Image: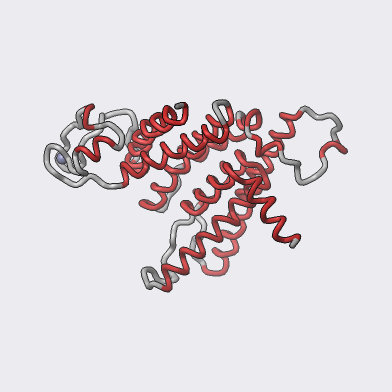
Amino acid sequence: MITAVFFLFGLIVGSFLNVAIVRLPRGRSIVSPPSHCPQCKTRIKFYDNIPLISFLILRGKCRNCGEPISWRYPLVELMNGLFYAWIVNEFWIGGEAFLLMVFCSSLIVITFIDIDFQIIPDSITLPGILVGVSIAPFFMSSLTDPLPFNIDRVLPHIWPHVKSFLNSVIGMACGALPLLSIGWVWEKLRHVEAMGGGDVKMMGMVGSFVGWKGALLTIMLGALVGSLVGLTLIILKRRTADRVIPFGPFLALGAVATALYGSDIISWYLGLIRL
Ligand SMILES: [Zn+2]
């Protein structure tokens, strides 16, 4: 029952994410004007603006002019609804679940904007970093992981939330610095910008939510999936090796997997090495 409620809640938030995906990169307000058809500019009636349902009833076409509505709208709504249902199932209702919902929704918006425009807006990543270092330390279990050094030796009996806060800050650095240095080396070698500043800030945000271990895992997963997809596209000759494939969506995929199942993935991986 609760799962269903959060699925519906996720769908509704999802339709707001669609507005953000379309308007944020164009520098338009996400509050006004109300949604309208991009073709005939007719304002969309409230009963035609029900997540998923309206798309099915209208069979993916504008009621007024018949212009096809992108399948991405229902896809984004469905993705967000499934994420919320999944999260509330795994983490129940609470601060951590709420933060994970904000985290996943932000990454959905980042993914689709990066696919369309090859940019990752600061208006998502910078507030994300702020939430990551200020609120996440109180709720995120990933930030209670041990730090990369033994802080208890230096500061005995330190308040647990201070440890989580340190983990969040170190996580931010562990997310941003590798991308920053890869981008710097690549720029020196090839004289082209390889890693946009957006990816760096995005990984700063991710690290501040999932901690230093999670940040490194996210980059590993993102690079792994990204290179597999990139190679496949090159083999299928869909793209040449020179064309830049946005890295943000792969990092987002890695980040969501890490936020939901990071500790499971890490212990599975460490188990592999021991074998
Ligand atoms: Zn229309």
> In front here: 102 or 58?
58
Q: Residue pushed farthest left?
A: 65
Where 226 sits versus 32, above or below? below
Residue 232, x across and y down, in percent: 44, 68
Quarter assignment of residue 75: top left
Can you give x and y, in whole percent of width and height, for residue 97 in the image?
55, 31
Q: Residue at x 60, y 29 (%)?
A: 135
Q: How is the image coloured?
A: secondary structure
Q: At x 60% / y 38%, what residue is drawn? A: 209
Closest to the observer, 89 or 238: 89
**Left or right of 35: which side holds 218?**
right
Residue 14 point in image, percent of width and height = 38, 36
- The residue positioned 21% from the left and 41% from the top of the image is 38
Q: Residue at x 70, y 39 (%)?
A: 167
Ligand 1 position by quadrant? top left
Quadrant location, the N terminus: top left
Answer with left or right where residue 25 lies relative to residue 120. left
In the image: residue 267, left or right of residue 2: right
Residue 239 in the image, given as x and y percentages of width and height: 38, 69
Q: From the image, which quarter does the C terminus lie in?
A: bottom right
Between 209 and 1, which is closer to the camera in this rendering?
Answer: 1
